[in-house]
Image (cartoon, rainbow, N blue to C red):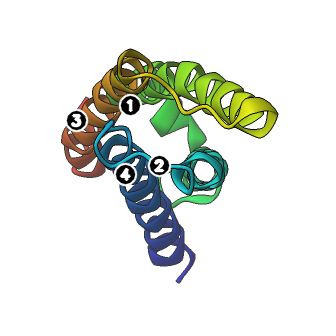
Amino acid sequence: MLEPLLAFFHISAFIGWIVFATAQAVMCRSDWFNAAAVPRMVRLDLILWIATAAVLASALARIYWGAKGSAWYWSNPLLHVKLTLFLVAALLQIGPTRQYRRWKARFDANGSLPSEAELTGARRLVMIATHLVAVIPLPAVFLARGFG
């Protein structure tokens, strides 16, 4: 029963990550961005990082408590492909996180909203990260079927 529950938690966390990153990408448009969006972006980002941590925690749980065992997982190059994609996507999210916090501080100080260039830059990084995350299921499917 543990293996299906670990898989469910991992997939749910992964979907949460995609959902909240997509929400950020949608909101980073100058024609949709307003005063209410500033604190919302910071909140979405916090939830995104919680989902990111849940993806990592559930992955480690599957590696160490899953049916195949940690030796099998760590020796499989597909796991390293997944981890590399995950780490690159997570690192790409650091830039937007810092921007959202700067936007909130600036908005709180003088009520100004980010420029179109700032929104576009944040959106670009979020979109690249989200597209990388969308590739992770490909090696995951092969890994689950014993390839590598």
Image quadrant occupied by the C terminus: top left
Q: Is residue 108 above or below residue 128?
A: below
Number of residues whose C-alpha sits closer than 10 Å to that of mark 2, classed few (under 14), some (14–19) or many (20 or more)? few
Q: Earlier in the sequence, mark 2 or mark 4?
A: 4
Q: Is residue 48 above or below residue 93?
A: below
What distance separates the C-alpha of mark 2 from that of mark 4?
23 Å
Residue at 40 percent across and 27 percent down: it is 119
Q: Nearer the viewer, residue 49 or 12?
A: 49
- Numbered badge on residue 34: 2
Q: Label 2's element?
A: loop
Residue at 61 percent across and 30 percent down: it is 97
Residue 37: % across, % down: 52, 52
Q: Label 3's element?
A: helix
Residue 74: % across, % down: 52, 29
- Numbered badge on residue 20: none
Residue picked out by circle 3: 135
Residue 47: % across, % down: 62, 56
Q: Earlier in the sequence, mark 3 or mark 2?
A: 2
- Numbered badge on residue 18: 4
Q: Nearer the viewer, mark 1 or mark 4?
A: 1
